[in-house]
Amino acid sequence: MTVIEQERIRTGGLLTIDVSAVVRNWDTMRRRMGNGRDCGAVVKADCYGLGATQIAPALARRGCRVFFVAMPGEGIALRRVLPDPDVAIHVLTGPLDDGAELTAHHLTPVLNTPEQLAAWQTHAPGRPFTLHVDTGMNRLGVPLSAFMALPDSCSPAVIMSHLACADEPGHPLNALQQQRFATARARFPGAVASLSNSAGMFRGDDFLFDLGRPGIALYGGNPVPGQSNPMHPVVRLDLRVLQVREIDTAGTVGYGATRPVSPGMRLAIVAAGYADGLLRTLGDQGSGMIHGARVPILGRVSMDLITFDISALPAGSVCPGDYVTVLDAHHGIDSLAAEAGTLGYEILTGLSGRYTRTWTGS
């Protein structure tokens, strides 16, 4: 028995991640930026749960030279696999102390307050930094009025802001944030300007500026909700069937006895649950695919188990050891998220470490 086969029988699910699809998606987003502009990659939260150690080097080999992480620790870990100092790694929360670790690992802080700016210029004079201006999200960032009052000597390498409603094309805040960011950009015209996330890169040329910051689109999420997804699917998730049972007495299934079952129904119980990132809201809403047939989730999702109704399949066609597919090219992260009443971001980042992970195309 191979190591992979041994690993598979120790876990309840197989998570397959197509690294080459991530690279193709980055190519798509780079083309969106057009000539004369750059395209980075948001790889925070371990590449949205899919493995920064495997994915980021593949993007760097393809030509990506600008990466964004959320926390200093993520940046330090990323620098170990991207040692080239010409590859910029931006830490979105900025330094949480005097910034010594950031300088030691050649990380670029995203400074979000005048106080962070003053501290960085004191502790790391002459070192590059990114300045975040708040254009309307009211989260991180220097307020626009304070940003415009900064001295000429401030000299950021990059200025950035973040769109609050980029996935809603008609939302008036998009145009307002774009206008405010254009004003901020004029304050430091020598800095690289970055406004757009994945969805923002589809809002029009006025939103592109110098540097795009795609995130969810790289991992297969649809950056144009309501339209055909231009991105390649990245993940496949298969869940192992533990038991198949035929109901012989009327009753209910699962916690809370919320779903009745009747004689003759056949159920497949799989080895995954909300501890593995498959949300409780998928109960009676989600579905999977087995032997070419779509089968619904029946009853509540529990911590380690999910029940699928396989009554429509021929008797004996599903056996323990078979797999129910809940994520693939035909039923992607946005489809599963819609069934759960959430976002593809939450689905991806919630996929747990209990799956056997395999990276292909790297």
Image (cartoon, helix red, strand yellow):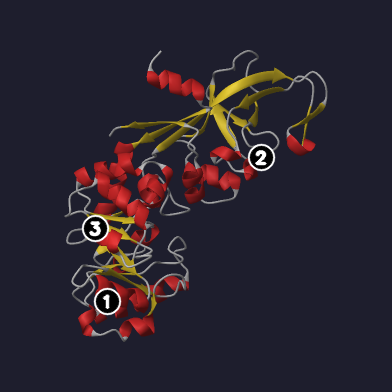
Is 316 on the left-hand or right-hand side of 220?
A: right
Q: Report which residue position mark 2 lands on.
A: 283
Residue type at mark 1?
Answer: Arg
Task: Looking at this view, name the residue that lies furthest to the right.
Answer: 250
Circle 3 or circle 1, nearest the eye: 3
Secondary structure of residue under mark 2: loop
Residue 23 in the image: above or below residue 358: below
Residue type at mark 2?
Answer: Gly
Mark 2 packing: few (<14 Cα in 10 Å), some, or many (20+)? many
Residue 56 shows which numbered tag?
A: none
In front: 184, or 288? 184
Q: Report which residue position mark 3 lands on.
A: 104
Instruction: Tell me which label, 3 or 2, sits earlier in the chain.
Output: 3
Q: Report which residue position mark 1 lands on.
A: 185
Secondary structure of residue under mark 1: helix
x and y percent of residue 308 in the render?
64, 29
The residue at the point 31 percent across, 84 percent down is 148
Residue 30 in the image: above or below residue 247: below
* Mark 3 to mark 2 CA distance (whole Å): 48 Å
Mark 1 packing: few (<14 Cα in 10 Å), some, or many (20+)? many
Residue type at mark 3?
Answer: Ala
